[in-house]
Image (tube, grey):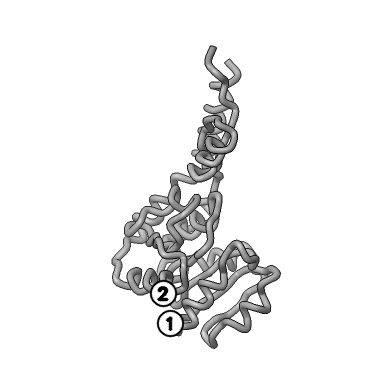
Amino acid sequence: SARVDHFVANSNHVRRRIEKYYRRDAAVIHPPVDTDFFQPAAVPSRGYFLLVSALVPYKNAAAVVAACSELKERLLVVGQGTERRALGRLAGPACEFLPAVSAEKLRELYQNARALVFAGVEDFGIAFAESQACATPVIALDRGGVRDIVIDRATGLLYADATVAGLKKAIADFSRLDLSGAVIRENSLRFSAARFRAELEQFIRARTR
């Protein structure tokens, strides 16, 4: 008889890991994003780049801070963690740290950013979807769950070179793109709560017959 599959992965990145280590298939059900709350601004200012992340080594916030500081680009960093002091020493004068913000403030920050920037590897990466729900593109390393969320050169830019120089080039390449806020917002709706409920219910029904 066929082997019953009860594994669920939050991204194709995790699905492949389950396949590699457990030799089992998994259904991919992406986590939900509150696309009703995270909405675009009527007239966004686009005055800075944004990093939303725990400030711990594997998130590689240092690459984002270094790249933006070397390019003299304004960067707002939302997050707390063990690397905060080291990042402060690395940061240029155009980098500002915001340890904790309300949901409403986070939405405002997403809405008015030029792009959300990330240089680490996430299993999924909820911030990527929240940013796009606010019609803000994403610049991210082309690894991990971001591949399920960002459409390269349509809703953001994915780059391959995991160095500060690679990210600096990605930021320069991004500045030459002309991306549609409507397309970015539309892409985020793939991660709505209604879609999540429907996919989860379908998964449960298929395995309880």
Q: Residue at x 59, y 64 (%)?
A: 53
Check disc 1 and give the amino acid type.
Leu
Q: Residues within 10 Å of mark 2 (few under 14, many from 20)?
A: many
Res 192 visible: no
The answer to the question of whether label 2 and label 1 lie on touching residues, with beta carbons closer than 8 A, is: yes
Query: Residue 168's mark?
Result: 2
Against 21, is 85 above or below? below
Q: Residue 138: image x %, image y %?
A: 43, 62
Q: Residue at x 47, y 78 (%)?
A: 68
Q: Residue 170: image x %, image y %?
A: 38, 69
Q: Residue 109: image x %, image y %?
A: 53, 69
| Res 152 → quadrant | bottom left
Seen as rendered, the residue at the extreme bottom is 93
Under circle 1, the secondary element is: helix
Check disc 2 and give the amino acid type.
Lys
Q: Quadrant of the N terminus?
A: top right
The residue under label 1 is 71
Seen as rendered, the residue at the extreme top is 1
Q: Please count the marks in the image.
A: 2
Against 102, is 209 above or below? above
The residue closer to the viewer here, 34 or 145, is: 145
